[in-house]
Amino acid sequence: MNATIADFHEAAVAAPADLAGEAGIPLSARALEKHYGGHAALDGVSLELEPGAVLGLIGRNGAGKSTLIRTLLGLMEPDSGEARIWGRPALAMGDAVKQRLGYVPQQPEALSWLKVADMLDFVGRFYPKWDAGFVRSTLDRWELPPNQLLARLSPGERQRVAIIRALASQPELLVLDEPGAALDPVARRELLREIATRAGEFGTTVLFSTHIVSDLERVASHVAFMHKGRMLLQSELDSLKERHLRLHVPDGAADQLVGRVPGEVARRPNPYGGLSVVLVRGEDEPWPALAHAPGVRREVLSLEDLFVEVAG
Ligand SMILES: Nc1ncnc2c1ncn2[C@@H]1O[C@H](COP(=O)(O)OP(=O)(O)OP(=O)(O)O)[C@@H](O)[C@H]1O
């Protein structure tokens, strides 16, 4: 399985060629490496987030999503490689860039000795486009107590306050690290709706990490799969489905299947006999002959199936 994942990686991930010339690109990274002891949390990760895109970053626990997000935002220095925000080094981000950026960390803890409304008032002073009306109405709509100390809120409530904080600054770029993790299903739905509105009506560029494939399918225009510190693929969501296929190869035909099929990502025996083979193809490339062979059944993969195939 490892070998096929590595091949997949080579085929599917193209590094941005020239980061320095990409002033219009909200986030980009080239060949990021980050190690903890001997363990690679980021292993040559490249990424590019286009203006107006909603990129869902998906990966299992420990895949490296938070490390990537923190490195992209200049909150963590990589061992090598480089991250840029609107074409400038992320590690040297100035206040003007920070004002265009909203970030919701996985476990928001900042300023937790303040009351909800006081923290939001205080932070709002640093943002020229701060929307105090949105803060008031959303605190009310999400039933958050303005006079409660942040430290006394539940993790989910604290996360919702952090989301309000990020959205109220009307950022051009919104980055959320597992925003759904501590939220109940209703709150998650509301957040997804808000992300979709921001992206659709205001052209906000969004990067969010998640384990929840259905959340990603609801709002993302693009998807990036991380696995064990590597970026397995980055793609538009629509074309991702068109470019992957699972073939069910019956027993007789499976016996003759020697060697790798072009574009093969994964192969496993079917419980009821024969093999299932997952293929990826390049844009506008034809499927290999096996896909048209007699008795071979073709199945379009859901995003969840694909995630399980490449990261399972
Ligand atoms: N400060 C640290 N010290 C040592 N190892 C770390 C540290 N931070 C992260 N790691 C390791 O790096 C890897 C990537 O962690 P990271 O938090 O980026 O993953 P993740 O995809 O965000 O996981 P999750 O979905 O569980 O939040 C994991 O194996 C983790 O144990």
Image (cartoon, rainbow, N blue to C red):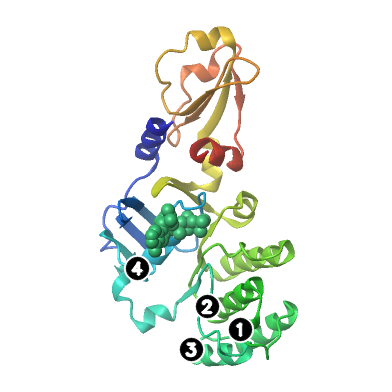
> Around disc 4, counting alpha carbons within 10 Å, would you say few (fewer than 14), some (14 to 19), or many (20 or more)?
some
Q: Amino acid at mark 3?
A: Pro
Q: Amino acid at mark 2?
A: Glu
Q: Nearer the viewer, mark 1 or mark 3?
A: 1
Mark identifier at residue 76: 4
Which residue is denoted by mark 2 in the rendering?
A: 109
Residue placed at 48% from the left, 88% from the top? 128
> Could you give the CA–CA distance between mark 4 and mark 3, rounded to whole angstroms?
26 Å
SS assignment at label 3 = loop
- The quarter of the displayed image where residue 143 is located: bottom right
> Could you give the CA–CA distance between mark 2 and mark 1, rounded to whole angstroms?
8 Å
* Quadrant of the snapshot with the N terminus: top left
Question: Can you give x and y, in whole percent of width and height, for residue 250 in the image?
Answer: 59, 13
Mark identifier at residue 176: none
Mark identifier at residue 150: 1
SS assignment at label 1 = helix
Which residue is denoted by mark 3 in the rendering?
A: 128
Instruction: Pick whichever, 199 or 99, lies toward us.
Output: 99
Vertical comparison of 88 with 216: above or below: below
- The quarter of the displayed image where residue 3 is located: top left
Circles 1 and 3 in contact, beta carbons < 8 Å? no
SS assignment at label 4 = loop
Q: Amino acid at mark 1?
A: Leu
